[in-house]
Amino acid sequence: MTSPRVPKLADQIKVIVAQMLERRVKDPRLGFVTVTDVRLTGDARDATVFYTVLGTDTDQAGTSVALQSATGLIRSEVGKQLGLRFTPTITFVADAVPENARQIEELLAQARSEDALVAERAAGASYAGEADPYKADPADDDDDHEV
């Protein structure tokens, strides 16, 4: 079981890393980065920082390199601000959520267009046989109403 303070530490690390990227890290390769989540192991020894980058694949690659080079500076600042006995190691991982969301949006758009095509075909369609394929016997209807 993990300590209840682990999620609080993860949130604090997220804020510290975001502030560092905004104010202290001056690497020109660093693109427009958003820290989306921080996951801390139960023993608070390892922190995985998930991030997204707005821009092209080149911007993402440059940001990845910039984050790797700034990891030591960021880790030391996390240690100073949190005052922990052991500062967790920090690993930066590009967040796959935006890519997955884009794929889901594309699939939904494709489904909508196919639904519209089916609806268009159905609008002008008629039944292959009669509209009501079940034959009702008029004599049976009379029997139901007798009391």
Image (cartoon, helix red, strand yellow):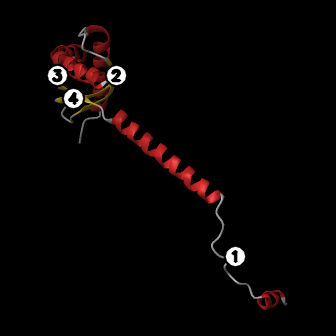
Based on the displayed image, in which of its 4 quarters is residue 22 positioned?
A: top left
Amino acid of disc 4: Ala
**Hey, what amino acid is under mark 3?**
Thr
Of the two numbered discs 3 and 4 on the same chain, state the one appearing first in sequence.
4
Q: Residue at x 24, y 38 (%)?
A: 2
Residue, disc 3: 87
Q: How many marks?
A: 4
Q: Nearer the viewer, residue 79 or 36?
A: 36
Identify residue for label 1. Answer: 132
Residue 88 as seen in the image, left or right of residue 130: left
Label 2 sits on what residue type? Answer: Gly
CA distance separating discs 2 and 1: 58 Å
Q: Could you tell me residue 28's position as x and y percent?
A: 25, 10
* Vertical arrangement, residue 111 with respect to residue 131, above or below: above
Pointer 2: what residue? 55
Mark 3 or mark 2: which comes first in sequence?
2
Q: Residue 143: image x %, image y %?
A: 80, 91
Label placed on residue 47 = 4
Sequence order check: which comes first, mark 4 or mark 2? 4
Residue 45: image x %, image y %? 16, 29
Point 84% across, 90% down: residue? 146
Separation of marks 3 and 2 at Cα, in angstroms:
32 Å
Q: Disc 2 vs disc 1: Cβ atoms closer than 8 Å?
A: no
As displayed, is residue 68 above or below residue 115?
above
- Disc number for residue 89: none
Earlier sequence position, callout 2 versus callout 1: 2
Between the residue at mark 1 and the residue at mark 3, the CA separation in whole angstroms equals 75 Å
Q: Quadrant of the N terminus?
A: top left
Give the residue displayed 51% in from the left and 51% down from the top: 114
